[in-house]
Image (tube, grey):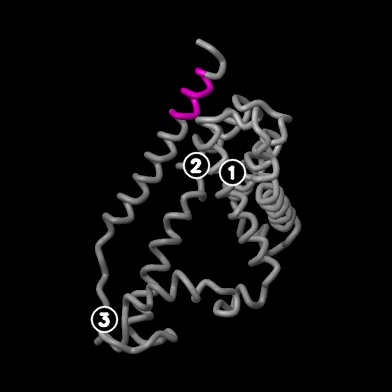
Amino acid sequence: MGTVNLSLIIIIISLSFAFAGLVLRVIRLLAYPVVTDPSPAKASARKGILYAFTTGMLPWKKESAKLHLLTYLRGILFHIGVFTVIILLFVSLFVDLTQISWSIAFSATLGLGFLAGVIAMAARLTDRNLRAISRLDDYISLGLVILVQLAGLMYVFGAMSRTFFWGIFSILLLYLPWSKIPHVIYFFFSRTVFGTMAGRRGILPVPKSGH
């Protein structure tokens, strides 16, 4: 069996393991009893959810983001880099990008995401408040994502083979179910709950109408 074939099997197994872990998280979330709001609806729950996922995400609509705009922008860039390296992984399963000039297409967002991740790690290590609330998993999860983004950059520039890129990504995927990284799932649940409750109660800037 060739090296590429073995690496492909490993990355597919790792992807399957990570996906199963995410599905299990969703099942556990859905197993919790649904708590309904007994108060009369004053506005629209649907429009509240729409607000929560759109204009409600803008920095000037969130006090924490408005007061820490650079941190907000750093987080945006970091997550764009995360999504970019995920896209890169799936594209690489079908095409070896070292054989094609793809560096420009991926390098900008990967580079900015990597830089944002390094700054975030430096802040977590040096800021007293961040250190106080950080656990070992915070450092491992962030470190692995930064490493994968760096590996993605090296891969698209031809400084790393596809099989080695898959190998590094596999480490992250195998660790993912045990880490804080699945918070991406909780994001969608929490914003939906927030939009539903706040929308129904009429405390969001959405038109008051039927729910």
Residue 63 lies in what quarter of the image?
Answer: bottom right
> Which residue lies under the disc numbered 3?
211
Q: Secondary structure at mark 3?
A: loop
Q: Nearer the viewer, mark 2 or mark 3?
A: 3
Instruction: Give the image location of residue 35, x and y in percent.
Output: 26, 70
In primary-sequence order, the first of circles 2 and 3 is 2
Q: Nearer the viewer, mark 2 or mark 1?
A: 1
Please state which amino acid type lies under the numbered disc 1: Val
Q: CA distance from mark 2 to mark 3?
A: 38 Å
Question: What is the total number of numbered labels drawn onto the structure image?
Answer: 3
Mark 3 / mark 1, whichever is N-terminal: 1
Quarter occupied by residue 148: top right
User: Please, is residue 143 above or below residue 4 in the view?
Assistant: below
Q: Residue 70 location in percent, x, y?
A: 70, 68
Magenta span has 64?
A: no
Per the image, the residue denoted by label 1 is: 85
Image position of 128 with respect to 203: above or below = above
Magenta residues (range): 5-12
Spatial distance from mark 3 to mark 1, Cα to Cα?
39 Å
Residue wearing tag 2: 176
Mark 2 surroundings within 10 Å by alpha-carbon count, few (fewer than 14), some (14 through 19), many (20 or more): many
Image quadrant of residue 140?
A: top right
Magenta residue check for 6? yes
